[in-house]
Image (cartoon, rainbow, N blue to C red):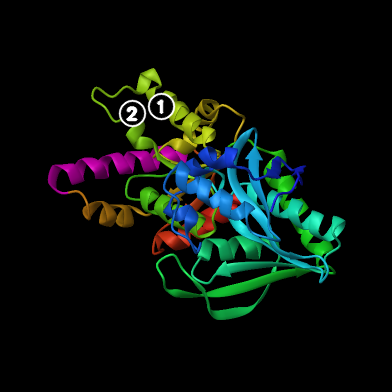
Amino acid sequence: MQHDLTLEGHGVRLVPLAAAHADALARCVDDRVWAGMTSPTPRGVDDMVGVVEAALATPARYAFAVVVGGDVVGSTSFYDVDLRMGRLEVGHTFYAPRVWGTHVNPACKLLLMAHAFGTWGVARVAYRVEARNARSIAAVTRLGARPEGRLRGHRVAADGTRQDSLYFSVLADEWPDVRAGLEVRLAREVVDERTSVLLLGGRSGVGKTSVASAVHDLLVARDVAHAVVEGDALDLAHPAPWEHGVAEANLADVWRRYRALGHRRLVYTNTVSVLQAHALAAALGDRPHVTSVLLTASDATARERLGRREHGASYDAHVARSDAAAGRLAEQVGPDVHRIPTDGRTPAEVAAEVVALTGW
């Protein structure tokens, strides 16, 4: 279906999908992106041209390319549009992973629903999600759409198996509350594009790496875009180049590349990171929001954990450094740093508390 509808606002622009978008869209797609679709993953531009042509050939479908800052980052559609009955569905949506967890999806859905309810005057906007697609289910739920039920054996997946579909919807009388929630969310996510960094510090054996990994798992489950950097690896060299600021310079280079991909949240681990917040913030380059967390553990806990990975002289050296770091941190860490104990707690338990401090 050819159309000339363009929607714009909140940092995104929806333009009529065309074959000219196929090259950029092909670069957005991999198996993760295409999960839940009923067709095989497009492999290259020719396959994506076929996807675009199929979209344009489908009656009652308004297909869009999603454009952010001049770059095509995905596609979405109105489909099964029946204005006589006052209903339609929103779907056939996919985005490049670099914009997952950003303002892009809520902004697109706000534009689409505002047009559907405000301009076309529909009574119902529905969302259909493949039942195994946890990421899409979470995204639709966060929009404020209400679950309606499961259609068993409703569709045929790309591998030929029959899959269930879950239905969600927003009705016209629910739209004002849904719109208000999306506008609040977008005001938070679009207006402030500065980096938000979580600094995890603490003595050796406190569990920094394990907690950072658990934070990563938690944010992935919530579909929150982020990056994790182990600070110890940024200047791991001999002779140790601490006095040359190599770690900060390397961090600046690494983060510049993540920023170019759309990331705004960083988890950074290093024993003394919480003492170096100002230098690390300067390296990130955009007056970042900083949440500093000092993970703590008793001597006994730190020794027991170090004993799992170090032995002999290496164990003794690590214990000595851990004890010295614990003393330095206890003495020098300021009141603006959150202290979270890890004794007797799982990394997932600590990660939940840490993430709550960030507001992510």
Q: Residue 228, position in %: x, y?
A: 44, 43
Q: Nearer the viewer, residue 250 or 274?
A: 250
Tell me the quadrant of the picture where the N terminus can be found.
bottom right
- Image height of 343 relative to 237, above or below: below
Crowd rating for badge 1 (residues with CA inside 10 Å; few <14, some 14–19, many 20+)? some
Q: Which mark is residue 250?
A: 1
Which residue position is annotated with label 2? 235
Dots 2, 1 in contact, CB < 8 A: yes
Q: Residue 76, position in %: x, y?
A: 63, 53
Q: Nearer the viewer, residue 94 or 56?
A: 56
Q: Nearer the viewer, residue 312 or 67?
A: 67
Badge 2 marks a residue whose secondary structure is: helix
Label 2, label 1: how far apart the Cα atoms are: 8 Å
In the image, which residues are magenta? 311-332
Label 1 sits on what residue type? Answer: Asn
Q: Is residue 302 left or right of residue 166?
A: left
Q: Nearer the viewer, residue 268 or 4?
A: 4
